[in-house]
């Protein structure tokens, strides 16, 4: 194996790293289980869990045009919050600050979430800190991209 391929393989997330993250999620430390690597969830009530699942399903229909994966499994969603009125607040990022379709992706996220009948409004905040990295990819995304 060449030195260059060694360097590349060392920078890729390992199966063991991903498995450790998944286990931390399932035992309750770190991110909420089932929300993607690093995503956090804030619900006003436990009754909102089905609504959260609808939001995640909607987010999985929004695709980054440069990487043929949805924004949720790419790990672009940092926070999903629902208040007592079911108003949604999402904090997200993009793979690069110079993304030419940034506005379109954010608008699509808002539109898809607000299409859920129980959601009166969706506030989408685009942030750059922390920056997106490959370790935010979901297991599905890692499989699709051939990292696992």
Image (tube, rainbow, N blue to C red):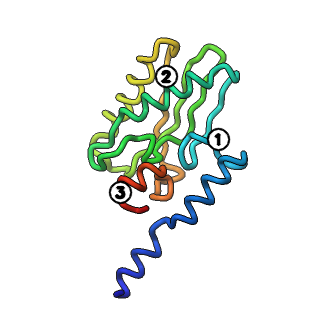
Secondary element type, mark 3: loop
Q: Which residue is mark 2?
A: 122
Q: Which residue is mark 3?
A: 145
Q: Position of residue 94 (x, y in %)?
A: 40, 46
Q: Please tell me which residue is depicted at 39% across the width and 24% down the height of the picture.
A: 112
Q: Which residue is mark 1?
A: 32
The label nearer to you, 3 versus 2, is 3
Q: Quadrant of residue 58?
A: top left
Q: Quadrant of the C terminus?
A: bottom left
**First reached walking from the N terminus: tag 3 or tag 2:** 2
Q: Residue furthest bottom?
A: 2
Q: Position of residue 136 (x, y in %)?
A: 50, 53
Q: Quadrant of residue 42?
A: top right
**Whole-number angstrom distance, CA of label 2 to CA of label 1:** 21 Å
Q: Are marks 3 and 2 in contact (CB under 8 Å)?
A: no
Secondary element type, mark 2: strand
Q: Are marks 2 and 1 in contact (CB under 8 Å)?
A: no
Q: Position of residue 128 (x, y in %)?
A: 48, 48
Q: Quadrant of residue 146?
A: bottom left
Q: Please tell me which residue is depicted at 57% across the width and 43% down the height of the picture.
A: 39
């Amino acid at each position: 194996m060449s030195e260059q391929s060694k360097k590349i393989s060392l920078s890729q997330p390992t199966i063991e790293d991903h498995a450790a993250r998944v286990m931390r999620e399932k035992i309750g430390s770190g991110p909420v289980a089932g929300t993607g690597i690093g995503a956090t969830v804030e619900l006003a009530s436990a009754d909102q869990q089905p609504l959260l699942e609808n939001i995640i399903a909607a987010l999985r229909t929004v695709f980054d045009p440069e990487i043929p994966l949805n924004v949720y499994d790419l790990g672009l969603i940092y926070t999903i919050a629902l208040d007592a009125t079911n108003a949604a607040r999402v904090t997200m990022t993009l793979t690069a600050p110079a993304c030419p379709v940034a506005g379109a992706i954010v608008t699509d996220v808002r539109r898809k979430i607000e299409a859920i009948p129980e959601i009166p409004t969706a506030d989408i905040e685009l942030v750059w800190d922390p920056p997106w990295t490959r370790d935010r990819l979901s297991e599905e995304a890692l499989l699709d991209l051939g990292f696992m």
